Image (cartoon, rainbow, N blue to C red):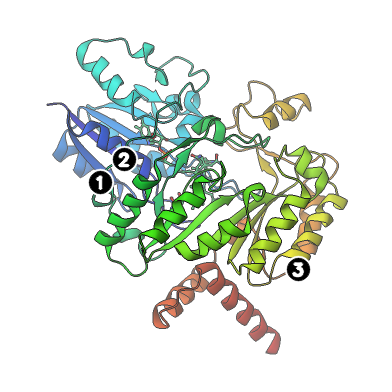
């Protein structure tokens, strides 16, 4: 039986470490036909990777590349050098064929095939393509005929995947594979309820990664996964996090998930990213609270009517105001996310967003500010950047480039943001979202000592406020 090592390369700890869900799903698809080892590389050193390779002697290595960089303009951290050193160096000493995949790979397949000197790659979801590729390699088939497969020395073209039906349960024992222990202090257990994103935000890579059509998972399967994982992990700090591109689209699915959790009387803690304002309703927020949501992320990216149009958002400022009002009425702890500096951004549009923050966002809720938009290939923003002469069609975007409205420019954008957040302590630049280690340690300590269940961001905000008040009193 051929041996396959599935290895994740994600050691990122900001904003917190995340378990490799996608790779675990691939393990489920291969384990009956091959001898498969699943290796979460989060805490591994290069020597430990080397030891695993020497002991297991795989024929193939499936390497998952999730993050390329942290998208922080000005002080970007690239994850690639660490990945090459920790994982690729020992891999190159082995005889195994190297197959790449993951969201980072899907965005930059051509560049990463070269950087890693890989034998094969698969763009997009790989539950079908990976078994087909291995079968073709073992039985003399033609890998180039398999949708999504990238061959060494050839261009990937457009990611053709994202049509997998999601009507079967992922697996009844996913949690036994995803060892949650190293993630339990700060992390969150990932749950996917659908794939796809039908929105058209000009800078976003999600539709490239997951396709444009929402493909829903069966509600009972999702809730079974939550229930069995909760029963097995038995950790009072366990938080489930929904990792859909937007949790509450298409309408009805999020409601149905919450209703099923309530019906089963599960006592779970939940959070989600990606709440789209259009489908936020009082009913949904009621259900979310009853189901166990302790916090949400709201990601309008701007609150300027002009910028909502320029970003091709599917909502208006009225949708956003209504959603923000409902969120406050329901006292749902919320982290808000804004991306400033897109096409057409001016001082006036920035001030519109800050006015919204003042009027609609409470001081205990955190506001994350991203400065400039990372340009991703094959997005309308990349086309605009080419048309405006900022980049050339052949420019590689692997080393990140950021779009900043020419009406402002980098310095002016930075100055306005600095000025505006000076008296808004809950507004945090993305650079600051890596909390100083002392602050993080103090927050973790306090949470443990006081058995605190409030969202981590609220503990951090409070300690930050106390610290700056202390400084003023000295
Ligand atoms: C949810 C999410 C988060 C959540 C994670 C919560 C959690 N508890 O897991 C939060 C908000 C915390 C987060 C944070 C960050 N994220 Co994020 N996140 C996502 C998102 C939306 C979904 C990821 C996910 O879980 N997908 C579901 C699983 C099932 O899919 P998957 O892992 O991709 O696996 C499938 C395929 O990729 C493939 N595959 C995977 N591995 C392999 C291996 C092989 C060999 C093969 C063949 C195939 C293959 O098959 C799998 C099954 O179909 C993606 C965008 C997206 N739509 O994919 C961004 C994304 C991964 N994030 C991104 C980034 C940058 C970050 C941050 C660095 C941001 C920051 N500055 O802090 C941090 C890093 C955190 C960390 N520790 O890694 C980028 C990465 C690209 C880049 N620029 O580097 C993405 C792609 C978004 C984007 N901008 O395009 N993120």
Q: How far, Cα to Cα, is label 3 from label 2? A: 49 Å
Q: Is residue 61 left or right of residue 54?
A: right
Secondary-structure class at tag 3:
loop
Q: Is residue 453 left or right of residue 95?
A: right
Against 415, is 462 above or below? below
Task: Quickly name the residue at label 1.
Answer: 172
Residue at 53%, 46% (x, y): give it. 252
Taking depth in this image into account, of 450 and 394 the one nearest to the observer is 450
Task: Quickly name the residue at label 2.
Answer: 169
Task: Report the mark closest to the observer, 3 or 2.
Answer: 2
The quadrant of the rendering that contains the N terminus is top left
Give the mark, 3 or 2, whose residue is nearer the N terminus.
Answer: 2
Task: Report the mark closest to the observer, 1 or 3.
Answer: 1
Quadrant for residue 355, please give it: bottom right
Q: How far, Cα to Cα, is label 2 from label 1? A: 7 Å
Residue 434 showing in the rendered view: no
| Residue 356 x/y as whole percent | 78, 60
Q: How far, Cα to Cα, is label 1 from label 3? A: 49 Å
| Residue 174 x/y as whole percent | 28, 47
**Numbered circle sitting on residue 422:** 3
Against 112, is 152 above or below? above
| Residue 399 x/y as whole percent | 57, 36
Secondary-structure class at tag 2:
loop
Against 104, is 316 above or below? below
Q: Alpha-carbon neighbours of circle 3 within 10 Å: few (<14), some, or many (≥20)? A: few
Is there a contact, CB below 8 Å, between mark 2 and mark 1?
Answer: yes
Residue at 42%, 21% (x, y): give it. 148
Q: Alpha-carbon neighbours of circle 1 within 10 Å: few (<14), some, or many (≥20)? A: few
Quadrant for residue 373, please give it: top right
Residue at 24%, 35% (x, y): give it. 5
| Residue 350 x/y as whole percent | 81, 53
């Amino acid at each position: 039986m051929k041996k396959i090592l599935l290895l994740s390369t994600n050691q990122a700890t900001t904003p917190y470490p995340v378990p490799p869900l996608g790779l675990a799903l691939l393990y489920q698809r291969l384990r009956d036909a091959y001898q498969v080892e699943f290796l979460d590389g989060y805490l591994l050193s290069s020597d430990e990777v080397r030891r695993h390779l020497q002991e297991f002697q795989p024929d193939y290595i499936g390497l998952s590349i999730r993050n390329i960089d942290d998208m922080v303009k000005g002080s970007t951290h690239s994850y690639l050098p660490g990945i090459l050193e920790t994982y690729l160096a020992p891999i190159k000493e082995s005889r195994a064929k190297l197959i790449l995949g993951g969201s980072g790979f899907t965005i930059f397949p051509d560049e990463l095939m070269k950087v890693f000197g890989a034998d094969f790659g698969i763009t997009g979801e790989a539950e079908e393509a990976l078994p087909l590729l291995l079968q073709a390699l073992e039985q003399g088939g033609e890998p180039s005929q398999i949708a999504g497969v990238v061959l060494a020395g050839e261009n990937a073209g457009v990611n053709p995947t994202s049509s997998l039906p999601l009507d079967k349960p992922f697996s009844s024992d996913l949690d036994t594979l995803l060892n949650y222990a190293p993630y339990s202090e700060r992390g969150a257990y990932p749950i996917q309820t659908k794939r796809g994103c039908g929105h058209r935000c000009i800078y976003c890579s999600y539709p490239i990664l997951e396709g444009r059509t929402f493909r829903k998972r069966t509600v009972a399967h999702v809730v079974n996964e939550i229930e069995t994982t909760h029963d097995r992990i038995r950790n009072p700090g366990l938080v489930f996090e929904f990792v859909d591109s937007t949790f509450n689209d298409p309408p009805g699915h999020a409601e149905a998930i919450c209703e099923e959790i309530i019906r089963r009387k599960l006592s779970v803690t939940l959070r989600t990213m990606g709440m789209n304002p259009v489908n936020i309703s009082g009913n949904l927020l009621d259900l979310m609270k009853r189901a166990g949501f302790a916090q949400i992320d709201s990601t309008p990216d701007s609150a300027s009517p002009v910028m909502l149009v320029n970003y091709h958002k599917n909502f208006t400022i009225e949708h956003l105001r209504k959603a923000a009002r409902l969120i406050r009425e329901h006292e749902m702890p919320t982290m808000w996310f804004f991306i400033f500096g897109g096409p057409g951004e001016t001082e006036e549009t920035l001030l519109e967003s800050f006015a919204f923050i003042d009027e609609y966002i409470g001081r205990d809720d955190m506001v994350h500010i991203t400065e400039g938009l990372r340009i991703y290939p094959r997005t309308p923003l990349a086309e605009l950047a080419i048309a405006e002469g900022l980049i050339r069609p052949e420019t590689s975007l692997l080393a990140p480039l950021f779009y900043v409205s020419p009406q402002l420019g980098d310095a002016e954008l930075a100055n306005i943001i600095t000025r505006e957040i000076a008296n808004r302590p809950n507004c945090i630049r993305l650079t600051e979202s890596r909390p100083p280690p002392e602050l993080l340690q103090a927050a973790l300590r306090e949470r443990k000592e006081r058995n605190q269940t409030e969202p981590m961001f609220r503990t951090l905000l409070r300690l930050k406020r106390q610290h700056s008040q202390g400084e003023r009193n000295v």
